Image (spheres, rainbow, N blue to C red):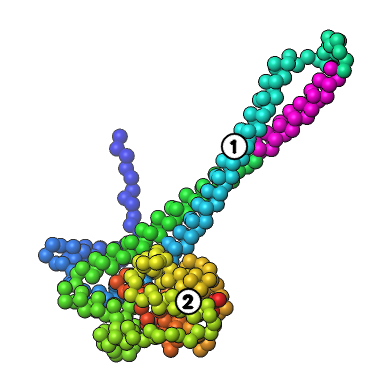
Amino acid sequence: MAVHRKPKLSPLGGQAARTAATLALASAATATVFEGSGHAAPRPTPAQVKTEVDRLYEQAEVATEKYNGAKEKADRARAAFDRLRDEAARRTERLNRSRDALGMIAAAQYRSGGLDPALQLALTSDPDQYLERAAIAEKAGDRQAAAVAAVRRELAAVRQLRGESEGRLRELRAQEAELRRQKAAVQGKLNAARSLLARLTAEERARYEATVAAGGHGGAERASGTSGAGARADRSSAFRGPVTAPGTRAAEAVAFAQAQLGKPYVWGATGPSAYDCSGLTQAAWRAAGVSLPRTTYTQINAGRRVSRAELAPGDLVFFYSGISHVGLYIGGGQMIHAPRPGAPVRIAPIDEMPFAGATRVG
């Protein structure tokens, strides 16, 4: 027997249904145009490539700072786990020694037969000898009780340490997973940028790389109208001599940063042969005897906030709304920073990027 069902009504009816069908056909036709082998997407202009690459590098820097933060947490978790594991090993060794001592006492009792003291007195022809033996037995009993207590203490300590170690190990694995995610995010952005740059001709690529070498993020030349060569010459000579800093430590930090000029940018690097932006500022202030946290978004809270008008050499200057970039101020509106891949540690104007704030440390 046939089963009859009512036809399902479309939620779109009449004119709405016809409009939806028309849009679907148009969408399919558009997809065919762009996906068909005979209609390749137009090659982006060098200006479009530069804009998109700049955006990808900025996103990569955000991901780099998240990676740095995740690595710092993973390192702390690993150190805590290692400390607990070492302490558990030491406690286990002590537990084994206590167990051995308890075993020796038990073996001695077994060899002596463990006779009841009254029976021993009855069988002993020399009462003085018995009393002497009783005193020794009492001391052995005290040692046995102490050995049992020691075993119990060490066993409880080992159990607690092993429980804490398991918790730290779970934390470490979670941090390492986050580290892998952030590393993949950085590499994905950098790979996308490289793929875009590969679409440029050799001449266009050379012009782009000259601009990056001269201006890092590209804002200074657009703002001032200087050419890449002129900007590069200015930066190679500016502030090469001593910088007047407000204190000895600030002067030492600036001097260290000056000595790193020309070293490559490598994401996640903290020196001595390469740096990322926060790795450079951390290393500079470490050379001055001040310990800074690892990331831009923690370094900004590592000292006293100062306004742009108050800036002095040695201050940390931060950029972008997400506090994803940092440099070391050296005076005259200039900073030393590690810009991004392809742009080594260099001197640049702080107007080159969107200013987000400054901090004075030391």
Q: Earlier in the sequence, mark 2 or mark 1?
A: 1
Picture quadrant where residue 54 is located = bottom left
Where does the magenta region start and end?
Answer: 129-156
Q: Residue at x 86, y 20 (%)?
A: 131
Q: Is residue 153 above or below residue 167?
A: above
Image quarter of the C terminus: bottom right
Q: Nearer the viewer, residue 136 or 204?
A: 136
Residue 213 - label: none
Magenta segment includes 37: no
Q: Position of residue 217 (x, y in %)?
A: 34, 78
Q: Residue at x 43, y 89 (%)?
A: 332
Q: Position of residue 229 (x, y in %)?
A: 25, 85
Residue beneath label 2, please? 253
Q: Is residue 99 visible?
A: yes
Magenta segment includes 150: yes
Residue 93 - label: 1
Please name the predominant secondary structure of the magenta segment in the image: helix
